[in-house]
Amino acid sequence: MNHYRFCVRFLAGLMTLSLLLGLVVFTTAQSVSAVTIGDPFDNTGSNRPDNTYTIPGHGTRGPDEGSFFKTGTSASGTPITTGTGDDWEAGNAESPVTITFPNTSDSNYPSEYGKPFYSINYVDKNDFLDFSSADQANNFNKTGESEFNPGNVKSKMDANNKLKSGETYDDGYLQITGNVPIHAQLANSKTSVDAAMAGNWGVMARVTLPAGVDAKSLGGAVDWTGSYFYLNLQTISLAGQNLKNINFPLQFDHHIYLDAQHKNVFYLKVKGIPFGFTPSNGNSSATMKLLNGSADYLDYLHNVYLDSQGKESQLDEIGDPQTVGSGDSIQPNFITQNNGKNTIWDPFYGMINESFSNVPFVGTALKLVTSAFSGSPVYEAGSVGRAIALLNASDQSDNRPMVKIDWDDVNPVILGLKLIKAFIFDPFTRVISNYFVANGFYGSAHINFSFDMSKYRGSSDTTLQSLTTNRLFAAPYSDGTFNTGDTSGSDDNNRRSYGITMYDSNQLVDKYNVLSGMDRSDPTKDTALLNQMKAGTSPMDYALIKTGATGTEFPVYTNFTSWTAAAVPYDKDTTNDTLHSSGNPIGDDLRYRKATPDPRNDGALLNDGGNIIVAKNWDHAGHAPEFSADKKTLVKAGSITPERYANVYEVYDYTKSTPTLDPHPIYSADEPTLKVAVANGTNIKTGYTGEATSDFAPGQWTYSGTLNGIPIASANLGLNQSLTPTMDLSSSPFLIVPKTSVTNGQHQTYSLGN
């Protein structure tokens, strides 16, 4: 901006200015309470939480809340699984459900479950966003295409992975979408059903953040209400006929597990949602329920299934509205299922009819046969009920009986029942047993979770918090990127500043050994087992990663760039700080500064919206007001242009070979690619003629620009300066009134005293 002087004439003590006053609203950083709260629970020793649903000092968590644990690893404990199913009943493992991450290049791996990946996008809202592949996810900012996007989520990046015009790094959501191929296998045990319903199964993830990003602060920004799961599992096939899909509900356990050795690392746990079934009407009806509905109902409803047409549906039959009850009694509105015959667990009627009902001749015969069986309210509940009823059928327990038929007493002539038993029912029992137990099954979990950057509290380094709070964190590399290439971290072309490593159930331990000594062979023998496997107290609730486990590194693609420099409004005039700041350019008042210069003694605020030269010093003499020799008359008004407050800081020292935190100012003279302007809050034209169109009472300047073509983090500066003249007539011998008030029949009456 050129050197401006604001000339003002005085006539008979009256200042006349041609000003059209306008208002600009001043906004500051949003103040939002954290959703991950409380002091970290110290799980480094023998101290065990009574229930992991309880937030220390706050009570039972809500569906939108989470808490911290001091560590995500343990050097000792009973393995959650060992890879050997028999170890469950032998007491050598704490869960009967083994979950591993298969080699997707293996010939046995079904290709329809895709390759493993995580893709991170910086988006405008938090909603379910699903991609069919890493390629689709990584081009979202370019094409806007996705497999499923009901909320019309949009990237804040343009096709070149740079911040869109008009967008800012403030607020927004850092959304992570992933495809996690899995293989699951259950122990051949009557209590496998109990463990599955208790949510006593799962895996963990280690999240590594760019150097300088505080894990606790970012973990506190996880939006628990925006976590979604889409679990797609292999179907069970019998004689060429496929059963309907089966499913199990997943959740993040609402904890951020910290790492004492690495401030930029935290851990997440994915586990089953605890649920069960309540029988009624003499075991002819049943209703699904969550064991802690008030905490988990939203997580359950965010487990979705996409059919072959890509239509979203809930896992089980849900009524309208989707929830019932309130407070501690809230539950998803599960629809009560009927048609049981003294048992709610027998799946044969449902599975045979839905599989073979359309097969000529066979279907008709089987309908007659299965009329002797009971319908299963559990099986009919939906995909989760179907899975649990089938799992129970592979090795039923006495408290979950199925209809018993004495085949020897049945007339063998009638429809050849013995042949049907031999060739249909017995083989099917073997099929489902092989599916769950002997061979296991493949699938993939599509995972969505987000960080609400309006809740990010910035770096743990207090000197950086004002720069980093409530916004996307700075890029650790000068080109604004994070991960590149195959994200392996092997070289600079394959950067991995943001990493996600998955740990399967064989790499987890229960350090408290909560099932020690309990009988796992039969749920009716040891009530202590079922009492322990409840919401918040199962082994998986206490599970940690075994110290030294290597895990499986997933590719992590970052489809965004971030700022490498930030605007820092600060008064560079050493004679008078018109911002009344803390004295530190990047002090904690950075987001709340307001310029209130005196128009006579400091100068008028003027802006033409042009480019700004960011200099180390401000030319006070060249912009200061000029007075007469007696200091009573203002000869020339001073000017304050945006340059006076223009400062730009880098968070990292980009000259180092590795990302190194070192906040420091930069200047136009040293950075020829630095471009800064205040495009809003203009009140003069380019080629200033001495007239301002408005003042700033109040107003705002937004400092924005680019460095190396990458948008800098913008900053707002509040303004409050009125150029409307005021006069103090308390000691004047003259009474001055507007001419219009005493002409054309107008008059003014004043009491002049005694």
Image: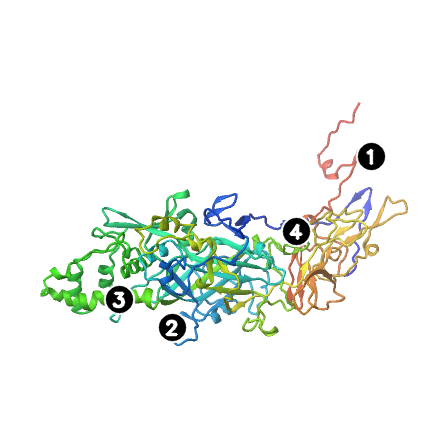
Separation of disc 4 and disc 3 at Cα? 66 Å
Query: Which numbered dot is residue 724?
Result: none
Q: Residues within 10 Å of mark 4 (few under 14, many from 20)?
A: many
For marks 4 and 2 on the same chain, the one whose residue lies earlier in the sequence? 2
The single residue placed furthest to the bottom in the displayed view is 107
Query: Dot 2: within a 10 Å radius of its alpha carbon, few (fewer than 14), some, or many (20 or more) residues?
Result: some
Which is nearer the eye, 624 or 652? 652
Return the x and y of residue 421 as percentages of the image width and height. Answer: 18, 65
Q: How is the image coloured?
A: rainbow
> Could you tell me which residue is drawn at 73 percent across and 45 percent down?
724
List the residue tagged with mark 1. Answer: 732
Tell me, for residue 591, which label it has, or none.
Answer: 4
Q: Rounded to the nearest whole Å, what is the CA distance between mark 4 and mark 1? A: 43 Å
Looking at the image, residue 329 sits to the left or right of residue 138; the answer is left
Whole-percent x and y of residue 184?
Answer: 38, 65
Determine which quarter of the picture holds residue 179. bottom left
Instruction: Report the amino acid beneath label 2.
Output: Pro
Seen in the picture, residue 134 relative to 222 is either above or below; the reply is below
User: Does the rendering let one see residue 131?
Assistant: yes
Task: Work out which residue is located at the far right of the displayed protein and give it.
Answer: 629
Q: Which is in the foreground here, disc 4 or disc 1?
A: 4
Residue receiving disc 3: 430
Q: For the residue labelled by badge 2, is the local secondary structure a helix, a strand or a loop?
A: loop
Give how far apart the Cα atoms at labels 4 and 2 are. Answer: 53 Å
In this rendering, the answer to whether 536 lies above or below 391 is above
At x 44% / y 66%, what residue is drawn?
A: 180
Along the viewing direction, whichever of 631 and 502 lies nearer the viewer: 502
Which quarter of the image is occupied by the C terminus?
top right
Disc 3 and disc 1 in contact, CB within 8 angstroms: no
Q: Nearer the viewer, mark 4 or mark 2?
A: 2
Dot 4 or dot 1: first in sequence order is: 4
- Residue bearing the label numbered 2: 110
